[in-house]
Image: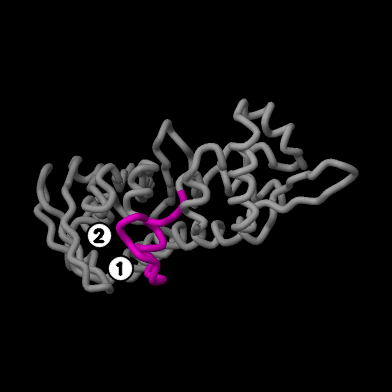
Amino acid sequence: MTETVRREGDRIVLRYERFLPHPVDDVWRAITDPEQINAWWGTKPEIDLRVGGDYVSYHATGDRVVDRIVRLEPPHVLAHTFWQHLNPDALVTYELTEIGNGTQLVLTHEMTENDLRNAAEKMKWDGDIYDLMSRTAAGWPRLLTALNSSL
Amino acid sequence: MDAFTVVADPTRRRILDELRGRERTVSDLVSALGVAQPTVSKHLRVLRDSRMVASTVDAQHRRYRLEEQGLRELDEWVSAFRRLWTTRLDALEAHLDGRRR
């Protein structure tokens, strides 16, 4: 598994890559079937599986979050917005590639500095992971580098 | 001012960048950034208050350097953020492994 954080213009991109020893169709179902998502994400979303369709998720905080499917190329690409009311430009993309009998999964989560700043202004710190996430400082990939070189 | 707000400012981010791995005086920073001295001093004060930089005085110069404490706070945020997806992907993997068995 590899994990990288990089900056592309004003966008911050988190990228995770891992090999799953399962057929691509199985992985596709695991990320698009609400029952299966419930099993690994912990809450069951409502998904209108088409481009422009709603991706509604529920969270431990009681939030009902309506996102939108932006790309859909079964069984290879699924992209949806992520907390679009707080982060209008944030996007989560799953890309699946068959490798032998397994699947290479590349997950990217990209957002702009503005997304982070807006979210931070709207939310108060309460220790919740999403709060934490949306407040994560603009420019932190550079700071992380600064930290690594200073410690 | 919380750490987020502190680093949201581009000039402060540039100052932090300049301090990577070395100490700098205010005039070093003024010439490196091309920003007026009062502006640099103002931002340094904010960074010092949030414990992202520290300073020492030697002879007549005050030298600034990165400080662990404030930066660690940011690092914790980053770690929590990264854990979100790592945890989810671990769960996805376990889920798929469980179904095959």
Q: Is residue B38 above or below residue B54?
A: above
Q: Residue at x 49, y 59 (%)?
A: B2
Would residue A123 be visible to someone looking at this image?
yes
Q: Is residue A102 shown in magenta?
A: no
Q: Is residue B23 left or right of residue A51?
A: right
State which mark lies toward you, 2 or 1. Answer: 1
Q: State the image coordinates of residue B49 (x, y, percent, origin top left).
A: 62, 57
Contact, mark 2 vs mark 1 (Cβ under 8 Å): yes
CA neighbours of label 1 inside 10 A, class few (<14), some (14 to 19), many (20+)? many
Q: Could you say which disc has been placed on residue A40 in the image?
A: 1
Mark 1 secondary-structure assignment: helix
The disc label shown at residue A65, or none: none
Residue B92 falls in image quadrant: bottom left
In the structure shown, which secondary structural element does the residue marked by tag 2 occupy? helix
Q: Which mark is residue A30?
A: 2
Residue type, mark 1 in image:
Trp
Q: Chain of mark 1?
A: A
